[in-house]
Structures are given as structure tokens and as C-alpha cells.
Amino acid sequence: MALVVQKYGGSSIGSPERIRRVAERVAATRAAGHDVVVVASAMGDTTDELLDLAHQVSRAPGSARELDMLLTSGERISNALLAIALTDLGYPACSLSGPQAGVFTTPEHGYARIVDVLPTRVRQELDRGQVVLVAGFQGLCKDTDDVTTLGRGGSDTTAVALAGALHADVCEIYTDVDGVCTADPRVVPTARLLDRVPYAQMLELAAHGAKVLMPRSVEYARRHGVVVHVRSSFTDRPGTIVADRADQEVQMEKTAVTAVAHDRAVALVSVTGVPDDDPIRPARVFRVLANAGVEVDMPVHKSTRGRVDLSFAVARGSAPAAVAALHAAADTIGFAAVTSDHNVGTVSVVGDALTADITATVCETFAALPTRIRLLTTSELRISVLCPDTELDRAVRALHEVFELSTPLTGPPATVYAGTGRGW
Amino acid sequence: MALVVQKYGGSSIGSPERIRRVAERVAATRAAGHDVVVVASAMGDTTDELLDLAHQVSRAPGSARELDMLLTSGERISNALLAIALTDLGYPACSLSGPQAGVFTTPEHGYARIVDVLPTRVRQELDRGQVVLVAGFQGLCKDTDDVTTLGRGGSDTTAVALAGALHADVCEIYTDVDGVCTADPRVVPTARLLDRVPYAQMLELAAHGAKVLMPRSVEYARRHGVVVHVRSSFTDRPGTIVADRADQEVQMEKTAVTAVAHDRAVALVSVTGVPDDDPIRPARVFRVLANAGVEVDMPVHKSTRGRVDLSFAVARGSAPAAVAALHAAADTIGFAAVTSDHNVGTVSVVGDALTADITATVCETFAALPTRIRLLTTSELRISVLCPDTELDRAVRALHEVFELSTPLTGPPATVYAGTGRGW
């Protein structure tokens, strides 16, 4: 008998019919003799609808505390409905709020971080033979006795954190796609479902455009050794296991490249003509951006003829904040110009022990398209290229083909992607 | 500076526009220098919509605990939205769940009773200059650490209980009518708004068809001496004060009758041919009904020729349960027949120190209609008549006229009713 944590996203429980279907899936796991803890997101568009209400009563709903009171209702509703549906199927169930489940957080409303999970009540209810449903995305700040939300990817993080605290055998993340693929199947029709992805590669994929998991929950899983199983809530396909293996995988030796990720929501920011008289000037660029909460990716530092040019990728949404912060610090940095280009995207080849040979192949592939590389960065696990966003799909397809990612690595037959086409 | 508790019903906050309007009213009270605690119900039809969802995921949503988790979200949403709207108007506000506000209850889900109110957090937030919004209708059972709901009239009871615990100066109940009238203005167009009604009379009115307040909250107010002010959330009319006066009111001496209430949701149950050999038999009738949770009103006990006939009014919805419970106990009671008539209603004349003269006037009024009286009971505060429900409106109008209830008793000009026509 295993202890299984299952997480269902908003689209998986977007209607009463889907809630009943999810209840049947949970019931099947329970009927197989396993203990089950379920973390469900808010139904479909509930969160957006509640936010819309807030904007209707206020020009600028500024109180993060009240927004959290408002938004956490969404998960309570969906989890209570799931509990009702399960009880209807003959499986006793009990829904708990984040605070009741012992999810304790920092006090930052809207983007709290989990500091502790004490699932005493969850264990009690499991011992009483109940399926336990926990409202995801929320917790309690002990200092303020206020309900908090965890921000984007919060429900995944709740599920992984609970799985860790309960020493669950597996944390199943149910979503509307079949699992983690070698590329986005909407861009690459021959993309193949991956059986297994190690944490570090999954982190790189998640951080560079793969929507199926949030980097934050992967990081939590890695740190606490939680085995994550990404599966479709609409099919019985095998899905993808995210975990490290003690033994070296045979498959991993055949090719170093696992998958190609891409991200359209990127902007290229360039700071040019920084005097090269004092190395503190370019450092100030990164300090200013860090203080403004802007994450910088693929930084390129080029020094020529007494001046330094800096370029880097940022999330497209934070580009205006980045430019504003840099202009505010113009005097201390002393740049000639700051520019931002929103018509770009990134392609990332993710794998293990990526060699210079693979970097060369990436560059040759872009040259053959031909597509101009605007930025290029490499690491052991990832080679990323920033290019015009109009070239993104062609680049993804070309790289997927050149690294032969459509070909299954070993025995098990390739799983042909047949998902719903959202995320991958 | 006063401490004011304001309660707003679901229709008063049924849309974002109405929430903004309520926020302006709260802000005006705060701007006048008063401390304000607000208890709001769920928005409009939220509770029904949530119940509908529960019925869509389950043929018979049996888990009262889960229904409570589900339904309590409604009040959290509306109170958070009110807090956001108030903050937008420049008045810092903080919404608290029932548990956060220190409302502790018995464990019965769906019909919990308040056992204690410890508003420590409410006081803290008031001291910090905040308007405090408390989710009505809900509390926490300390023994189970579960959220409970208080059942019908729960938000009124939350407001009155908080007003009592906080020693508030007044508990204002905002509703969609102008206050308590001498009769339902939909039946009696000349019905007059009452300035003031003592607790005991308000209890009688509420228990016999006046929808404006639930008996439960009036009883709580009476026991804890909370001054209740029933007002319209759509107008600035003065409303009705429910409270006892230390000094005898001049108005009260002019006539004993205060108002006429009526109730259409009534059934007449008759148990006939009970052998008159042992007085335990009729007693068993009432014991059986009490055990079945059926409230009995206007009982008439008639003994003739060795047999006893019992008749009484019950809420129409509980008539089937009453008949079933009586049939199940047929052997120990030994009746000849049990009948129930759903085509009846009650008219109640409520006042103070009602005399035999008034009883005679009531009977004469029915005789003049002519309308047959099926049951009649009298007490110091109330004379109730059960009659065919088709005769109800005529009887209410006739009694309202004969006791001259349209005529204002003293100086202040009569407030002409101009409500929205729901309840009275």
C-alpha cells in the first residue's frame, strides 16, 4: 500500500462533470488500496472571476491581504466539491484548508513561501480511512494568523511540499497534457513523451519555457527528493517521472540532448556604452535589476575600445521595469543607451553533460535556417539561443530533428502525443 | 464616538455596484468618527449557486462538513470584496473569517449554535483604525477544528452576537425593506413603519411570519440586551429600533396592538380519536413530534365522549415528517386518524397586554368577513388565528383596519412604505 499525493489543475476540474471524473480517478487509486491526499486548484477560471470582481469594486485593489482572503475561497470550493463527489462514490473524504493541513508560510501576501508543513491533521484523517483533500496555493502565516497565497505554481508546490512532509511514495501532478515531451507538440508534431527526466534538466526545461511544471515546485521536489509523476487527467497514458536515478540510465548514454524548450515571453535588453574605467559600473547594472526584482537570463558582457556593452534576456513582462530601473540609475552607471527589443524568443537545448560538439551543432543548425543568433549561452545542462521570435518555431523543429529527439531511445514504444494542445 | 456593528444581507451586496454602495455607507459611518464592524452575508445568490454545484457533483451531497467548507466561501468572498472597496475609498479595512473573529460554535454542521464570541482580533484591528469585516453565518468548532455554519438567519445572529461581545452601541441590520411595519405592505398598502418594537413583541412577529428578522437573532439580542436597528440599505429612512425601554412608552398606552403578522407556510395537523383512558396518550403525541424535531404551534386539545382530538399548526415543510412520526408511533398513541391540511395560514395580532376585549374583536372581525376560524390561541402578547390560506390577505387587511394600525400614534410623521416589496 502506497501513499499517493495527487494534484489536479484548474482545467482538470473546470466543471461539475470534470470534478466527478477526477473523483472517479481518485476513487480508483483508493480502491487499489492506496492512501490518497489530493490537492486541487480552483475550478477553471474561478481565480480570474474573483479578481474581476475585485476590479469591479475597486479601481486598484491594493490590499494583498484581502485579495488573498478572496482568492483562497476558490480552492476551498473546488476541494469541498471533490470531497462531496468522492463521498457520493462511497469513499469517505474530508477537505482541509491550507491552514488546517498545516501549511505554514512567510507573511508576504500573494507570493508567500512555504516555511513548514506539519500535516498532523492530514495524517489523522488518513488513519481514519479518509481521502484527504487539501486546498492548494494557500497557507497560514503563524505570526499574523492570516491566510496567504503562494503565487504562481502554488498548488504544485503545495502538493510537492505535502508529499515531502508525508514521505509519500509519489506526487502525481495531473494536467491537461500527457507529460513532459521532447518539445512542444504544437510546434513539433513528432515530439515524443519522455518517460523520465532528472530534476536538474526538468528545472532547466521549466525555467525556459516548458509550462507543464513550475520551476519552483521542481526545485522543492529536488531538495526534498520527492518523486513527481506528471500525467494527463483525461487519459491513462503513462506520463513522465521527474526524479533522479541512482543507477546511470542506459538511455542517457545514447545522446546527451533530452528536449528542446522555447519561450516566447522574452525581451532582449541592452545597455550600451558603459565606460570601461571601473568594473563597478557593469556590476551596478545587475545590482539595479536585482533590486527591482527583475530576473536576468543569458547575460552577455562585451568590452571593446574602452566601453562595455551588456545584453541579457528578461521576462517580457518585466522589461519596462528593467528599463525604468536602469534609467533611474543612469548617473551611477553612465551608459550611452538602454534599448529593449520585445520581438525575440529563446530556444534551449536541455540535456546532460552538453559538449562543445553540441554547441557547434546548435550554431550550425541556426546558420542553415538561416537565422541570426542574437545571444548564446551554454552550461553543462543547457544551450540557449535568443533569436527573433518569428524564427522560433523553425529553430525548435530544426534542433528537434538534428538531435533525433523523435526516435525512442530504448525498448518501450514511443508514446504518440495526443494531448489537448495546451502547454506541454 | 460609538461602536457600531452593521449587518448587510445578500441582496444588499448582490452586485459589485451594490458592494461599492454599501462601502460608501460604511465609510460615511466611519467618517462620522465611529468604530465600525461589518458583517456581510454571501453575495446575492452565491449560496444557492454553490449548493447547485454540490448537487451537480453528487446525487445527494450528504457530507454536512463539506457543505459547510463549501458554503462558508461565499461570505469570505463578499467580505473581502467589501474590504477592498473600502480601502479604495481611503478607509483601511480588514476582513476576518468567522474563526478569525473568534466566533466559536457547537459542532453541528449546517445548524451550529454560537457558544462563545472572543473578538480579540476584532478589537486589535479596530484599535489600529481599521474597519473590521466579519464573515457572517460561520464559526469554528474548537473540538473538531472545523468550520461550521449557523443555518438560517446565521448572519443576523453573528452580527448580534458580535455586538453583544463588543458591547457595541447598536447593531444595525441593513435589509431590502425600510424596517418593521404594522403589516406586510404587499398585503396592506397603508401599513406603517414602526419606530420601535420591544424584544418580546419582535420575537412574536418574527416567529409568526414577519421575515425582516429571524427569531433566533432577536432572542440573542434580548438575552444580551443588544439594541437592534433594522434599516434599509437602499434608502436613508429611519428604520425600526428593536429594544426594550426603561420608561413606559406613551405610544404603547394608546392601543395594545402593535402589528399584524401572517404566515402562509403553515399546515394544520390533526390527531383524532385518541382514547381518553390515560393522559399519557396525548402527551405521547407531543413527545413523538419533539423527538422528530417538529415545532408545534397553536395546540388545541379537545376531549369529548371518551376520546381526545388534538390539532396544531406546524411549518408546512415539516408536516410530512410530523405525519410520518405519528404513524410510526400509532400503537402507543392509539389514535383513530391523522390528517394534515396544507391549505391554511395563520394571522397573528401582536401587542402588549392583549385583553379579552381584543380577542373578541378578532373573532368579530373574522365573523364579519365571513371567514371560518380553524384554530385560535391567545397569550399576553399574541392572538393567532389559523384559517384557510385563501382568506389570509383579507383577514390581515381587516384586522389592520379594525385596530387602526395605519394611524401614527404620536408626533413624528408616518413613514410611508416604499420598499422593494420583498419581506417586510
Image (tube, coloured by chain):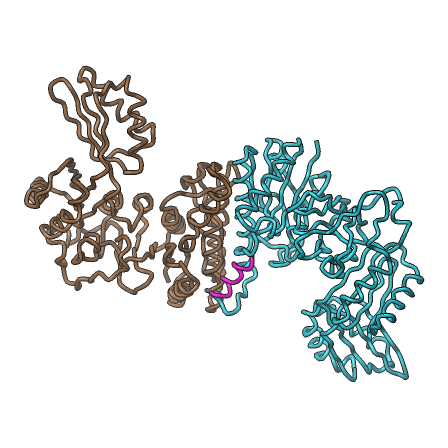
Chain colours: A brown, B cyan
Predominant secondary structure, magenta span: helix
- The answer to which image quadrant residue A219 occupies is top left
B133 relative to A168, above or below? above
Q: Is residue A11 magenta?
A: no
Please state if B58 lies on the left or on the right of B397 as rendered.
left
Please report the residue visible at 74 percent of the width from the left and 64 percent of the height from the top.
Answer: B263
Judge left or right: residue B170 versus residue A180. Answer: right
Residue at the farthest top position: A277
Indicate the quadrant where residue A28 lies.
bottom left
Residue at 18% x, 15% y: name it.
A277
- Which one is in front, B207 or B138? B207
Is A281 on the left or on the right of B328, as rendered?
Answer: left
- Looking at the rendered image, the quarter that the N terminus of chain A falls into is bottom left
On the rendered structure, is A60 left or right of B47?
Answer: left
x 85%, y 74%: residue: B301
Relative to residue B141, is residue B34 depicted above or below? above
Residues drawn in magenta = B47-56
Residue A17 falls in image quadrant: bottom left
Residue A370 x/y as whole percent: 8, 43
Q: Measuring from the top left, give residue A270's x and y in whole percent.
A: 21, 29
